[in-house]
Every structure is written in C-alpha cells, then in structure tokens.
Image: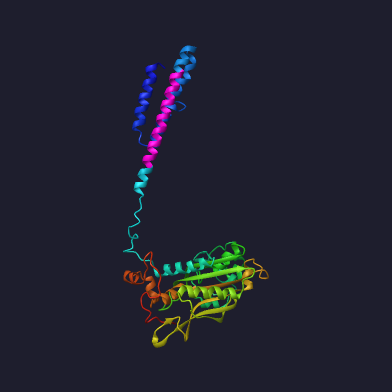
Amino acid sequence: MPRDGTNRLIETATAEIAVATSLEALDDVRVKYLGRRGSLTLAMRELGALDPAARRSAGAELNAAKDRITTMLAEAAQRLGRAALEQRLAAERADVTLPVPFAGDGRIHPISQTIDEIVAIFGEMGFVVAEGPHIEEDYYNFTALNIPPEHPARQEHDTFYLPPRAVHRTSQAATVGAAGDGSRLVLRTHTSPVQIRTMLAQQPPIRIIVPGRTFRADHDATHSPMFHQVEGLVVDRSTHMGHLKGCLIEFCRAFFGLDDLPVRFRPSYFPFTEPSAEVDIGCSRQGGHLEIGAGGDWLEILGSGMVHPKVLQNCGIDPAQYQGFAFGMGIERIAMLKYGIPDLRAFYDSDLRWLRHYGFLPLDIPSLVRGSLTGVSAA
Ligand code: PHE
C-alpha cells in the first residue's frame, strides 16, 4: 500500500474512533482495521509480494499505522469506560436524607409484622425458616403425624378435602392410599406436615421455624377458614423437655417484651407429641380488661410436646438415637393479644382505615400499646 494510502487509513480510523460513542462501536472500528479481514491486516498480508527493499519500508509504515490505531483505540476505550461509570454513578446516586419510600401510603399488615418478629426471635436462637405446600397429602397432614384413618382428630380439624384423584401417585403416601386414602389431597389443617417433609428431607440436627397459611372449615368471630400458624421443630441427639421449656419461655418473654412474664406448661394431648403440653402466659382479666403479664389468670397461647417416637420412625429417624420437640401456635391469636386487635375478621377485610390503625410502617418499632387492649375477648 503506498504511503498516502496508509495515511488515509490512519485518518479515517482516527475520525471513526472520534465519533464512536460506545465500547461496542469502538470494537467495530477495531475489527474493520485490525480484525482478521481488516484493511490493515490485509495490507500486511500483501507485503510478501513486494521486493525486499520495498517490503521493508512498507512493512515499517504499516506497523507504525497499526501501533497508532491500537493506541488510539485503547485511549478511546478508557475514555468511554470512564464516561459510562460517571453516568452510572450520577444516575444511581442515593440520597440518604430522603424519607422511606411509600412511608406515607403503605402499611405492613399485622400478620406479616408478627411473622417477622417471630422469625427474628427464633432466628437468634439458630432456627431457619422452612416451608411446605398449602395443598397437602393426607399422609403428611395426618397419617405420618400419627393421626391414623378414623382418628377423631381428623374430624376436629374440620378438613377441606379436595376431590379424590383418579390416579394415585406412587409416592410413599400411596402405600396407605388403598386403606386410609393417604394420598388424598387436603388443604393443610396445620403447619405440622412441614415437620414430616423436613425430617424426610434432612438428617438431624434440625432446627426449623415454619410460618404459613393453614385452613379449616370453620367460620365465626374467632375462627377463619384461612388462618396462619407457625410451627417449630428441633431434633438432635440430646434434645429434652428442658430445651422445649427454655426455648418457649424465652420466646414468650421476648415476643411480649416482658422479662418476667409468667409462663406455665399444662399437660395436654396431641397425637404427634408425647408428652404434650399447652403453654399459657400470665394475665389478668380484672374488670373485663385483659392485661398480659399481670398475675391471677392464664391465657393459652400455643401447643407443644416432645416429638412422638412413631413420628420420628415414620421419617426414618431412629428414636433410640434422636429426640426432638415441636410446637405450633396461631399467628392471628398472638398478634391480637400483643397489639390489642379485637376482631379476627378484620385481618382479611383489607379495610384501609383498619390497616392505617393497626398496620406498621417499614421501620416501625413494635410496641405493646398499638390500638387498645380494652374489649379484647381473651377466649
Ligand atoms: N399442630 C397443632 C395444632 O394445630 C399444634 C402443635 C404443633 C402441637 C406441634 C404440638 C406440636 O393445634
């Protein structure tokens, strides 16, 4: 390529680099001149046809042009990169003095707030959150929890059954499918089936907390067909009743924010725990006014117990090696108690006035004095 040809090449490359506004456009310029079929590359390939003297001078010229263009490309890439970064920094600038987004409009529902508080307390104790399906197999909801077919607890749970399935799945549940219809689908009546799912999926040590929706065909002032529970499960080699008590006393006191809250364990019965205990907290009902933490009366807030050996066995865990404890509580109920919410039904009405009154701002600090405790029915 004659000298003025090389000069023209440098000139056009310079102009094209100057107008490239992105790294992609710049790369197009590189390919056009220095790529495998680039004009400079092709010109270099033709050097072989020249006689030695001409080849030497033309080669030096082309090499100089290549260096020049390479340098220009590198400089332009640096310039464009810097500009892109500055643009991003300007666009993504965060003004930390701005108010919390939507603080004026949105509220966190008391159910969500209460779940967050429970998860935070148990999180500190080393529990992790686990979840399971709302549509559950009869086997996980009942049978594996030592609630066999025809057990009265099945009636007490007011179960929503889904229509029988035409084809029984070949899961573990299908083995009881014929006699006990263990594969029939239900809307889970409690969060306890997640105990089973977790124990089948992982070996101990287990320490889970399971917040979620549950369903029972029951509807009045204190029952909703859809409600929320939180389940807890701990399984380890040396887990005992003392752990259950310590853990739940600690939780009750942290949740209600009362260091000296009286907590009582009352013998009870659940098919999936043995022994079982209902947990009550101290309160006073003087003059129809409920006061949590005061003496004189008791208020039931959750069910608990040591995991029944049969339940461990159903999950392939050897009860001679491992013990565990479990507990379950209704979220609406303890939210009503903590925040003085008098009527269960209002939880699901999506009434904005109610949400503004009982809801929480994103950075709200929980307190016991929200709303008014007067008139809470402490059933
Ligand atoms: N699943 C029980 C219920 O819904 C509560 C519970 C959970 C009791 C775990 C003991 C252990 O009433």
Among all residues in the image, which is located at the extreme bottom?
Answer: 287
Span colored in magenta: 59-84
Taking the magenta stretch, the answer to whether it contains residue 297 is no
Give the quadrant of residue 369: bottom left
Residue 166, placed above or below residue 80: below
Residue 79, placed above or below residue 365: above
Among all residues in the image, which is located at the extreme right?
Answer: 320
Residue 148: in sight, yes or no?
Answer: no
Taking the magenta stretch, the answer to whether it contains residue 73 is yes
Q: Position of residue 340 (x, y in %)?
A: 39, 77
Give the quadrant of residue 199: bottom right
Kindly identify the residue that appears in the image at 36 percent across and 40 percent down.
Answer: 83
Q: Position of residue 339 (x, y in %)?
A: 40, 75
Q: Position of residue 280 (x, y in %)?
A: 50, 80
Kindly identify the residue that appears in the image at 58 percent across and 78 percent down.
Answer: 276
Relative horizontal placement of residue 229, taking residue 288 as reference (left or right) = right
Kindly identify the residue that appears in the image at 42 percent across and 82 percent down.
Answer: 291
Residue 198, placed above or below residue 49: below
What colour scheme does the image use?
rainbow
Quadrant of image for the C terminus: bottom left
Quadrant of image for the N terminus: top left
Residue 96: in sight, yes or no?
Answer: yes
Count of marks, rendered view: 0
Q: Nearer the viewer, residue 195 or 108?
A: 108
What secondary structure prevails in the magenta region?
helix
